[in-house]
Amino acid sequence: MTDERGAELLRGGGGSHRATFLELFLDVVFVFAFTRVSQRLITDVAAGGERLPLELAQTLFLLLALWMVWSLTAWATSHYDPERPPIQAVMVGSMCGSLVMAVSVPDAYGAHGLSFAAGYVSIQLGRSIYLTVALRRHFQRHLSSRIVVWSAVSAVPWIVGGLVAEEDLRLLCWGVALAIDYLGLVIGWPVPRLGRATATAWTVTGEHLAERYQQFTIIALGEMIFVAGVGFSGGDFTLLRWIGLLDAFATTVLLWRIYFHRAGSVLVEAVAEARQPARLGRSATWTHLTMIAGIVTAAVGYEVAIAEPAGHADGVRVAAIVGGPALFVVGRARFEYEVFGRVSRSRVIGLLLLVLGVPLLGRLPLLGIAAGVTAVLTGMAVADALRARGRPPERPASPM
């Protein structure tokens, strides 16, 4: 392939920078994957016991693997042209591998460990090898070549972990593999002779990348409604459970409102106007991971509250109901700093209320705890509305 043919795979200045239908099709797989992760987390919380920390670590590792696949695919389609057949082939392959991972999640530390690991490795290694070959005479091949090396190294503990029968040893192997993958992402996948990829090596399209983050956040919020609805429909339609369902819906709407007002709604402009768009995009990867983890945890907490609205408020259930929204607020505060260069007082006050209110909330039944969290989020949303009233829309002022 010539330099010109390789350059055709890169995004140009013209044309639409919006997400394509194939990318939205990819997201459908992750809707299913998220429900598998949430159901696994619900099982962990319900079981409790001495192994709970290890069970939670297992589920967290699965979430981190899925997020790595989605985020690197989003970066690839922001760097390369998703309308080109070779890039579409990458996306279809990622979709297939993600489906394999998703169906393997429930028993990933049992009989289906190898299929989960194989799905992950096939995406990470296959994508990079394919792009390296497609760009073999273009200077941009060095970016995918670096990722090939790191993915090949992490593939060893991924596959070894999938082959071992003992679940704690599998957890250790996959922890090592994830550490390699995320370290490579942080430091730019350095390899001998090629060095590391700086943030400027990723010529991202701000509108596209920002839209992909927004869409994935909507996916997570939709999954929260899905989990609440499935949990409610599987039991009796009592008054307390109806209240729990409506409270879960209200919390989902509040999380949506807090995300998009205003940092989430101006993310496109923030990335486009940043001094280093790729650096802001990379930073936003971590903040969105934090918010997504918070939403997934909140979904579990509210499903528990719907299932047992008058139930006992032990430490694990309190942590799920309160900790999920608190984690979301932490990520949202960092996100606000990335976009505007400041953090509003409502974020700090809301987070303090959630954390410091745990001893008081812990005395309430599960539905009472959920309602208390909803009240705090409502206060944050109201504070946002009051702050914006009578003022022109705030413009991005990213320090990055």
Image: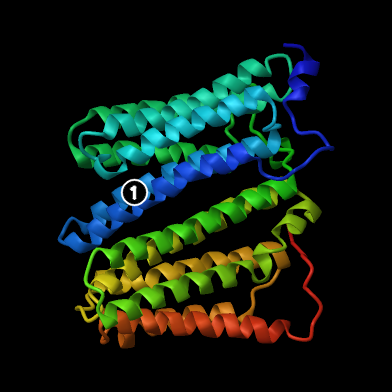
Where is residue 205? Give x, y as percent: 74, 43
Q: Which image quarter: residue 131?
A: top right
Q: Quadrant of the C terminus?
A: bottom right
Where is residue 117? Give x, y as percent: 35, 32
Residue drawn 22% across and 68% down? 235
Q: Within 10 Å of the Cα at label 1, are there few (<14), some (14-19), or many (20+) other Cα atoms? A: some
Above/below status of 209 relative to 265: above
Residue drawn 31% across and 30% down? 115
Q: Quadrant of the N terminus?
A: top right
Q: Is residue 133 visible?
A: yes
Where is residue 200? Give x, y as percent: 74, 40
Where is residue 212? Give x, y as percent: 62, 49
Residue that protrudes farthest toward the right in the picture: 14
Above/below status of 157 relative to 340: above
Q: Which image quarter: residue 386?
A: bottom right
Above/below status of 173 relative to 309: above
Q: Identify residue for label 1.
A: 36
User: Between residues 222 and 369, which one lies in front from this camera angle?
Assistant: 222
